[in-house]
């Protein structure tokens, strides 16, 4: 078993400058952890150790903050983080159905990552798009007024490479079939038929 040290992780010059600037300011730990997570997508243990050494705060205190606030992640998320709104409006309009469909299609639960590292699922309490309920957000893009049947279309839109869980469909195949109008409404896309 190898021991991981803080020296094994590299912080960008921008992150190092930010930590130096915030090192002695009140409330610095949360600000620094936000910046670390922004750089890595999560807070690796090596990064927590390095922050501990740089700002002279016990590692236990850092982990106390990381585990207290739901926003911070200690596991690397998927390339595409799917946030499913389970706030009141979304939940009442089928947000839980969207979550269950994602879990079935991707074969993961919230907080897990697909084997290929592409997708992870998170339950969130409100995205602020109640009028579009139920919604999911992927990479800052909001998809609203969804049904469980729409989930496959959205996943295929996000990751245009055909996936085994979605069948061997090409992007053009998505525009054919019973969901064509719904997909166009959801994604505001205009299909171009292939040359014949």
Image (spheres, rainbow, N blue to C red):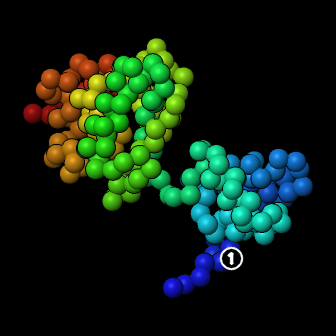
Q: Is residue 4 above or below residue 158?
A: below
Q: In this view, which residue lies farthest toward the bottom?
A: 1
Rendering coords of residue 124 (x, y %): 50, 35
Q: Residue at x 68, y 74 (%)?
A: 6
Q: In this view, which residue lies farthest toward the left?
A: 196
Rendering coords of residue 56 (x, y %): 83, 66
Rendering coords of residue 158 (x, y %): 36, 39
Q: Residue at x 70, y 69 (%)?
A: 49
Residue tagged by mark 1? Answer: 7
156 sits to left or right of 42: left
Q: Residue at x 42, y 31 (%)?
A: 136
Report which quarter residue 18 is drawn in: bottom right
8 sits to left or right of 196: right
Rendering coords of residue 9 (x, y %): 64, 70
Residue 6 makes an appearance in the image: yes
Q: Nearer the viewer, residue 145 or 93?
A: 93
């Amino acid at each position: 078993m190898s021991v991981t040290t803080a020296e094994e992780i590299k912080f960008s010059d921008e992150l190092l400058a930010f930590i130096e600037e915030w090192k002695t300011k009140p409330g610095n730990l949360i600000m620094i952890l936000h910046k670390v997570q922004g750089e890595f997508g999560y807070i690796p243990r090596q990064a927590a150790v390095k922050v501990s050494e740089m700002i002279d705060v016990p590692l236990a205190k850092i982990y106390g903050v990381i585990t207290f606030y739901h926003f911070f992640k200690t596991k690397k998320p998927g390339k595409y983080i799917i946030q499913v709104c389970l706030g009141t409006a979304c939940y009442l309009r089928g947000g839980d159905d969207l979550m269950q469909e994602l879990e079935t299609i991707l074969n993961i639960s919230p907080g897990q990552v697909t084997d290929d590292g592409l997708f992870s699922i998170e339950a969130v309490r409100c995205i602020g798009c109640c009028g579009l309920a139920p919604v999911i957000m992927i990479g800052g893009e909001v998809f609203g007024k969804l049904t469980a049947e729409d989930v496959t279309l959205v996943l295929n839109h996000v990751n245009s490479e055909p996936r085994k869980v979605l069948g061997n469909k090409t992007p053009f195949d998505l525009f054919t079939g019973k969901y064509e109008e719904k997909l166009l409404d959801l994604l505001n896309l205009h299909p171009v038929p292939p040359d014949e």
